[in-house]
Image (cartoon, rainbow, N blue to C red):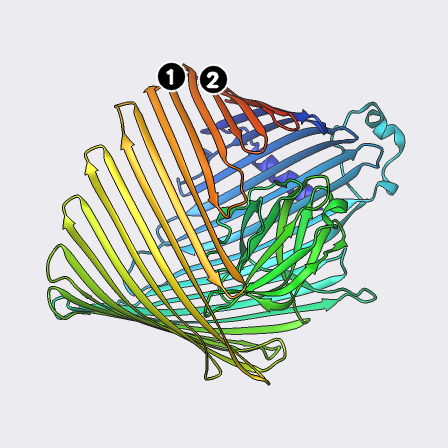
Amino acid sequence: MHRVVFFLLVLLCAVPVPVTALDFNAYWLYRTSGGEERDTSDEFQQRYTLGVGPQLSWQPTHALSATATIGYTRTQRDNGDDKVKVEEITPSVNFGIINDLFAAQLAGSATHYRTKPKDSDIHLGTSRSWDATLSSRWQQAWWPNLRFNYGERDSGKADPKIMKPDDVYKDIRDGDLRLLPIESNYHSEQVQRFASADLDWDLRLLQLDYRYNTSWDEDISEGTDSERRNHFVRAATGGRFWDNRISYTFSHQFEDDRTQVKDRPGVGGVFDFIVPATVTTKVTSIVEDPTDPLYNQPADGFSPPLEVLPSEYLQIQIDADAGRQVDHLRLVFDDLTTAALLEWNIYRRDFISGDWSPVATALQGVLIDGYLELSTGVAGASFLLMARNTPLAPVRLSAVGAYVRRDTDDTDQRHLTNAGLQVRLTNSLQLAVNSTLERLRRDSGSDDDRSTLSARLRWTPRPWITPSLSYSESRSDTEDQDGDEVDQLSRSYSFNLATVPLPTMNLGFGVTRNDRYRNGDKTGAGWIYSISTTARLYPDLNTALFLSWRENDNWTRTNEGVSRTSDQSFSGRFNLNARLDRNLSADLTTSYRSSERESGSTEVADATLSVQYRPSSLLALRAFYTAYLLDSEQEDVVGGSANLALLRTDKARLNFSYNVTYAETLTNRFSLNGSWDISRALALQSRGGYTLAQTDFYDVQVSLNLRL
């Protein structure tokens, strides 16, 4: 029935009247890769899209618009033993009305797909969606802005066992995968309905925002129904007075989030909810200790697939969004059998101190439905996973998911208050105070109260000197894994001095004192001293120096008494940049790190010298050498790169690049990238590369795009 209605809508758009635009887009792509000890992978993809719009000329006014598109995609993948053919067809329509009072939009689309894996049955399926939106457009003072939305989505598949007779599908046996209708054999697997209402109201002295979102999900394959309702209210104000000498901001927000999950009759399940989180990764050749003050946490974004070679260490950091908790993780690897042999150490970061503490060691994941699951054992907002790839084969990480296991009926309520005050006491003396109060209440009884307070006094008696005093305090009242109340407090005091002794020199000095408490007992204290300077020695010679000294004391209380441990660390970095010629420059970067703990002391240092030569806009050369000194176990690295523009015109570009590195092994990488605008409607793009290393491999991709 839905398909009949959709077809009638398309016919309505096809009445014999002029249209202002007719758009056709075609896209072809071919991709291949392979090499030694690797399976050859081939993929051919073709997409076609036909669109009509954006306005039909039969409307009585220009306020009415309509668009219609239909897209077709065919993809063939060949990964050796794994051969898959996928076809998709996606029609969509969109109607809109807009005037000075409101804007209304109705949109609908459907995607039919067919998948034919090698030596397997054909899988037919479809996904359909529609939504309607109504929003205000009036521009009147004291009038609120309103927006309402409602929509539905469903996805399902056809059972191949009840397909039509074989003679209808005779072409399939010959390899043809032309789309055929999916009719009575279709059944939904997931159905979702959603609605929302938004209000933004500017009351001059008060900005009021309200958001309401609700969704109903029916997962027929899992046998569960779930409903979620979320209310969000925020009120904010702020102002300036007394000739802008005093300014203030204040806001309070309340969020009520309720999730309810029900089993369908005769079906049971465990309810895992995905948690929005940020994932960062790092691969190292040596083991690192997150509890070390000198530890550098992962900073690279996750770009799958991430390859980890034998004897390398994989680090994955998961930071949940504000107010969220995580208690288990799911990892997807290309080869789960090999990945199941990994042993993981899991660390959780403390909210107050920011320090990492272990929660699990030598943990092996559990294989479940195509992924590897790791249970953290405790709930937290930030976790760090570390594993050493001990198997003989490399592993490739392709997906990371953070989840929380909730009860069937769960309600979270969150209050967040922010206040800020800035006072200009004199023309050279300024005071800034900020505070935050957060309260989180859960049905499970795990309540959290967090508060922060910071103040800063900044004085500028002369343009070349700026001293400042700062104070900050963070407090949290939470429950530990045993259900006991835990009150944690952290205070810090700092003094910073920024000076400009010379027009070509900046100098900064800072000292910070911090104290940590747990349930009223002091658990730690420390000092941090730092010096930083940047200077231009000559017009073409710049330098920078950063030094830091850290002292830390920790107290641990047990039934036998109080024990104290101390550690010290020092770090320094020196940079020197010189422009030797108009086309030639050199950089020298050195760093030194040392730490002394009761378990022992370490000293590591490294130095990198790089030279860049750019004789023209078409050629760029670079060479570098990195030496690892003292206790560092890393091998020295030497390498270089060359980038050459073989062709550069208004319509065509062709670039060649070569990269070489040598540490324990020699790696050469050759790359060729090009683009050609054959005409205003036709464009060609290509890229390819070949790598010579312990195992050689190549990758090539060519795409052609036609737009009419």
The foreground one among 389 and 212 is 389
User: Is there any visible trace of residue 248 in the rendered image?
Assistant: no
Give the vertical position of 164 relative to 269 (above or below).
above
Q: Residue at x 70, y 59 (%)?
A: 363
Residues at discs 1 and 2 in contact (Cβ within 8 Å): no
Q: How crowded is mark 2: few (under 14 residues within 10 Å), some or many (20 or more)?
A: some
- The residue where tag 1 is placed is 650
Question: Where is residue 550 shown, x and y percent of the image?
Answer: 39, 63
Residue at label 2?
Answer: 676
How many tags in the picture?
Answer: 2
**Residue drawn at 31 percent across, 28 percent down:** 585
Q: Where is residue 244 in the image (x, y as percent from the top left)?
A: 15, 66
Q: Circle 1 — which element?
A: loop
In-image side of 351 versus 192 (left or right):
left
Q: Residue 323 appears at what percent x and percent y?
A: 51, 67
Look at the image and tell me whether residue 707 can be seen.
Answer: yes
